[in-house]
Image: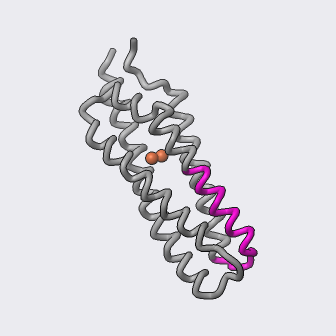
């Protein structure tokens, strides 16, 4: 049994990160524009929550974290820390989605834009840490294997 992270697997995770960045960008534009209906805003947040849930599941149960752990056991603490960040991130987005009920007033747009930027800040930080983790496990542990 090999401890190598499959390059295609790493690529798939990176691809999901890129897709999520696109979804965040679309939401940021909609929040700045303020012209979408409550139904559209709710569906944008719902879709983001679904994409996040799928992405986190791929990382936790789909093997991303276990691949990294198998390749670089010394990174276990960092992996656990990242894993623990998933739920609060998802809760932030679900809270916004569930706050959409009926007409969206100026306060909703303002509060949600601020809340969303807070989420984006934490999420990007999380993803950057994951990319570095992958890089570290892949370059150091795998690179020194041969
Ligand atoms: Fe993650
Ligand atoms: Fe991720």
In the rendered view, does 36 fall on the left or right side of 143? right
Residue 92 in the image: above or below residue 60: below
Residue 53 in the image: above or below residue 142: below
In the rendered view, does 54 fall on the left or right side of 134? right
Residue 113 in the image: above or below residue 83: below
Residue at image x 50%, y 27%?
7
In the rendered view, does 104 fall on the left or right side of 93? right
Overall secondary structure of the magenta section: helix
Where is residue 78 drawn, in percent x and y?
Answer: 29, 43
User: Observer-nearest residue: 102 or 142?
Assistant: 102
Residue at image x 39%, y 53%?
85
- The residue at the far bottom in this view is 106
Quarter containing the N terminus: top left
Residue at image x 45%, y 69%?
118
Residue 111 in the image: above or below residue 97: below
Where is residue 17 drawn, in percent x and y?
Answer: 54, 47
- The residue at the far top in this view is 1
The answer to which image quadrant residue 68 occupies is: top left
In the rendered view, does 81 fall on the left or right side of 15? left
User: Observer-nearest residue: 45 or 140?
Assistant: 45
Q: Which colour scheme is used?
A: one colour
The answer to which image quadrant residue 138 occupies is: top left
Q: Is residue 81 magenta?
A: no
Where is residue 22 drawn, in percent x and y?
Answer: 62, 55
Total of numbered circles in the picture?
Answer: 0
Residue at image x 61%, y 62%?
25
- Looking at the rendering, the stretch of residues picked out in magenta corresponds to 32-52
Quarter containing the C terminus: top left
């Amino acid at each position: 049994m090999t401890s190598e992270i499959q390059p295609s697997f790493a690529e798939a995770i990176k691809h999901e990160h890129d897709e999520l960045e696109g979804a965040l960008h679309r939401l940021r534009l909609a929040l700045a524009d303020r012209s979408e209906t409550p139904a559209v805003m709710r569906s944008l947040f719902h879709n983001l929550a679904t994409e996040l849930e799928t992405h986190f599941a791929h990382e936790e149960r789909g093997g991303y974290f276990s691949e990294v752990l198998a390749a670089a056991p010394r990174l276990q603490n960092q992996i656990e820390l990242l894993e623990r960040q998933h739920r609060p991130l998802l809760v932030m987005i679900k809270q916004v989605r569930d706050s959409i009920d009926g007409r969206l007033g100026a306060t909703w747009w303002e509060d949600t834009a601020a809340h969303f930027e807070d989420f984006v800040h934490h999420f990007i930080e999380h993803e950057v840490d994951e990319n570095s983790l992958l890089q570290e496990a892949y370059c150091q542990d795998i690179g020194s294997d041969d």
